[in-house]
C-alpha cells in the first residue's frame, strides 16, 4: 500500500511484481516513502511466510512538524504484547494485525482508546472501548493511563462471521502494569478481568466500531429490517439521512450512532478524494470450491478444496511475474481481459446459490487502467461457502473508503450515502460479511 512512485519492483507481491526470493537468496528492497506518516509494516507474501516474517515501520512527522494530536508521553510499538507504564500519561500504541486470516477485536480492561490513524494516514480522533483491526491493517491508538494503580488485562479476540467455518476461537491476553516510581505500587487483590470485547460473531459490533449501523426494526414502509443506513456528523451538526425512506426506528441514543472513522482532512494533512469517476469497477469477492486432482489431492468439503476468486476468476501463478512480462513485452504470460464487472449477475448475498457460481474459472488476467484516471472500485462480498469479513489490500496506493454497507450494492441508492467530504484513507479494508465496500483512488502510479 505504500505509494512508491514508479518503483513497483520493491512492492514484493510474488508472481505479480517479482518472482519469489528463493531459499538462501538475497534481495535488497529500496522503499520510497512519499505521503505516509504513522504506522505501516512490511511482511512476506510467499505462502505462510507472512505468519512470522514481518516487522513494523514507523514514519515520523518531518523535522519541525508535530503530531496532529497531543504529544504522547511514550510511543509503544506492539503486535499485541505487554508493557510497563507510568500513571497519568498518554501512550501511542502502534498496532499491526499480522494474523493470517482473522480480523481481531482489541481492548484494555477499564480503559478507553482513541483512534488517531490507520495505515499511515491520520484520522479525526475518536474514543472507543475497542477496535477491530483486519489482517494486514495498522492502527495508531492513544491510551490514557488514568485508572487506579493496578494491573489490567489487554486482550484480542478473533472476529469470524463465516457460518460453519472453523477458526481459533481463543482470546490472547497481555498485562498492563501501573508503576509507582521505580517500584510496583500496591495492587489490589481483585481478580484480573478481560475487557468487554464483543463476541466472535458480532457483525454489528464490528461495524459499530467505525459508526456504521443496520436498521433495528421496521415500521410500515421505507427500509426493511436489516437494511443499512449511514449517518454523518460534522462538528455539532448532523447531516440528513441520505437514504430515501420516511419511517423506521433508530436507536439514536447509542453512543456509536455516527460515522466515526473519517480522515483528519486539515490544512497540514489535506486529502484529495476524487469527486468524479472516470472508471467504475465492481468486483465480487468469493471463496469457491474446485476439484481435487491426483497431482494435488485434498480432503476438503465435498472432496474438494477452497479457491479464492475475484469476479469468479481464480488467479493462476505464472512462470514469469506479471510486471516483468508487461515491462519487457513477454507474450503469453497474462491476458488483459479481466472483467470490470461480474460476468454473471446473481443475488450475491442470497441463499442457496447454484453450483454454476460456486466453481470459478482460472487465469492470469490483468485490468489495465488509463494513467491518472479516477477510479471507483466496489468490492462486493458474496454468500458462497464462507460469507466472511474479507480483508482486501491495494498495493502502490492509498485509497478513500467512500461507502460501505450490507447486502447487494445498489448504485442508484447507495451512492447517495457516500462520504466525499472526509472519507477515511487506508491501504487495507474489510468487506462486511455479506456486504460491500466502495473505494476511490487515482491511477497515477504506473
Image (cartoon, rainbow, N blue to C red):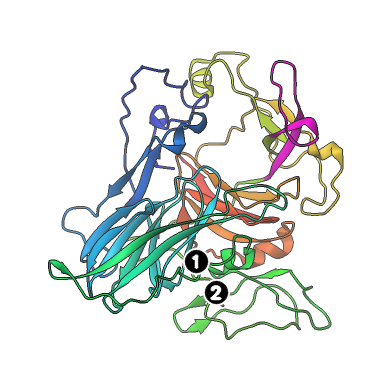
Q: Is residue 285 magenta?
A: yes
Q: Which mark is residue 421?
A: 1
Q: Position of residue 306 (x, y in %)?
A: 70, 35
Q: Residue furthest front?
A: 189
Q: Which residues are magenta?
A: 283-306
Gap in Å between the C-alphas at discs 1 and 2? 10 Å
Q: Position of residue 132 (x, y in %)?
A: 50, 60
Q: Nearer the viewer, residue 243 or 437?
A: 437
Q: Nearer the viewer, mark 1 or mark 2?
A: 2
Residue 113 seen in this snapshot = yes
Q: Which mark is residue 301?
A: none
Quadrant in which residue 57 is drawn? top left
Residue 122 seen in this snapshot = no
For the point 81% across and 39% down, the residue is 357
Q: Residues within 10 Å of mark 2 (few under 14, many from 20)?
A: many
The reply to whether dot 1 and dot 2 touch (C-beta < 8 Å) is: yes
Q: Residues within 10 Å of mark 1 (few under 14, many from 20)?
A: some
Looking at the image, residue 272 lies above or below residue 320:
below
Could you tell me how many numbered marks the image carries? 2
Quadrant in which residue 363 is drawn? top right
Looking at the image, residue 436 lies above or below residue 190:
above
Q: Is residue 124 magenta?
A: no
SS for dot 1: loop
Q: Nearer the viewer, residue 309 or 150?
A: 150
Q: Nearer the viewer, residue 442 or 194?
A: 194
Q: Position of residue 85 (x, y in %)?
A: 23, 65
For the point 22% across and 73% down, the residue is 87
Q: Indicate left or right for 201 with 83 as reference.
A: right
Looking at the image, residue 3 lies above or below residue 225:
above
Per the image, the residue denoted by label 2 is 232
Q: Earlier in the sequence, mark 1 or mark 2?
A: 2
Amino acid at each position: 500500500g505504500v505509494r512508491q512512485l514508479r518503483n513497483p519492483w520493491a512492492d514484493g507481491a510474488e508472481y505479480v511484481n517479482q518472482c519469489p526470493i528463493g531459499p538462501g537468496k538475497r534481495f535488497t528492497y529500496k522503499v520510497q516513502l512519499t505521503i505516509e506518516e504513522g504506522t505501516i509494516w512490511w511482511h512476506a507474501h510467499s505462502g505462510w511466510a507472512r505468519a512470522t516474517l514481518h516487522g513494523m515501520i514507523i514514519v515520523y512527522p518531518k523535522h519541525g512538524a508535530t503530531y496532529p494530536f497531543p504529544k504522547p508521553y511514550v510511543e509503544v510499538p506492539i503486535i499485541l504484547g505487554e508493557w510497563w507504564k507510568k500513571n497519568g500519561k498518554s501512550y501511542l500504541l502502534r498496532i499491526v494485525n499480522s494474523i493470517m486470516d482473522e480480523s481481531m477485536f482489541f481492548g484494555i480492561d477499564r480503559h478507553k482508546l482513541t483512534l488517531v490513524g490507520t495505515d499511515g494516514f491520520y484520522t479525526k480522533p475518536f474514543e472507543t472501548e475497542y477496535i477491530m483491526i483486519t489482517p494486514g491493517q495498522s492502527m495508531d491508538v492513544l491510551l490514557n493511563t488514568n485508572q487506579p494503580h493496578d494491573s489490567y488485562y489487554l486482550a484480542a479476540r478473533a472476529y469470524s462471521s463465516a457460518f460453519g467455518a472453523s477458526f481459533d476461537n481463543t482470546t490472547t491476553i497481555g498485562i498492563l502494569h501501573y508503576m509507582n516510581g521505580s517500584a510496583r505500587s500496591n495492587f489490589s487483590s481483585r481478580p484480573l478481568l478481560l475487557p468487554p470485547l464483543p463476541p466472535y460473531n458480532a457483525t454489528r459490533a464490528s461495524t459499530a466500531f467505525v459508526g456504521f449501523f443496520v436498521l433495528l426494526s421496521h415500521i410500515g414502509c421505507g427500509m426493511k429490517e436489516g437494511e443499512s443506513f449511514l449517518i454523518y456528523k460534522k462538528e455539532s451538526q448532523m447531516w440528513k439521512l441520505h437514504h430515501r425512506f420516511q419511517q423506521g426506528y433508530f436507536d439514536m441514543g447509542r453512543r456509536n450512532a455516527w460515522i466515526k472513522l473519517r480522515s483528519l482532512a486539515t490544512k497540514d494533512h489535506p486529502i484529495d478524494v476524487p469527486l468524479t469517476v472516470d472508471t467504475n469497477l465492481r468486483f465480487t469477492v468469493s471463496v469457491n470450491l474446485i476439484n481435487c486432482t491426483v497431482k494435488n489431492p485434498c480432503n476438503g468439503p465435498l472432496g474438494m478444496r477452497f479457491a479464492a476468486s475475484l469476479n469468479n476468476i481464480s488467479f493462476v501463478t505464472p512462470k514469469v511475474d506479471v510486471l516483468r512480462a508487461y515491462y519487457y513485452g513477454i507474450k503469453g504470460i497474462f491476458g488483459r481481459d479481466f472483467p470490470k464487472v461480474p460476468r454473471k449477475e446473481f443475488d450475491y448475498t442470497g441463499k442457496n446459490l447454484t453450483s454454476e457460481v460456486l466453481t470459478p474459472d482460472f487465469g492470469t488476467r490483468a485490468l489495465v487502467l488509463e494513467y491518472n484516471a479516477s477510479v471507483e472500485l466496489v468490492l462486493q462480498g458474496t454468500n458462497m461457502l464462507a460469507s466472511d469479513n474479507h480483508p482486501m489490500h491495494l498495493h502502490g496506493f492509498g485509497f478513500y473508503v467512500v461507502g460501505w454497507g450490507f447486502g447487494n450494492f445498489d448504485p442508484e441508492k447507495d451512492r447517495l450515502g457516500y462520504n466525499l467530504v472526509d472519507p477515511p484513507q487506508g491501504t487495507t479494508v474489510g468487506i462486511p460479511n455479506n456486504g460491500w465496500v466502495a473505494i476511490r483512488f487515482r491511477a497515477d502510479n504506473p
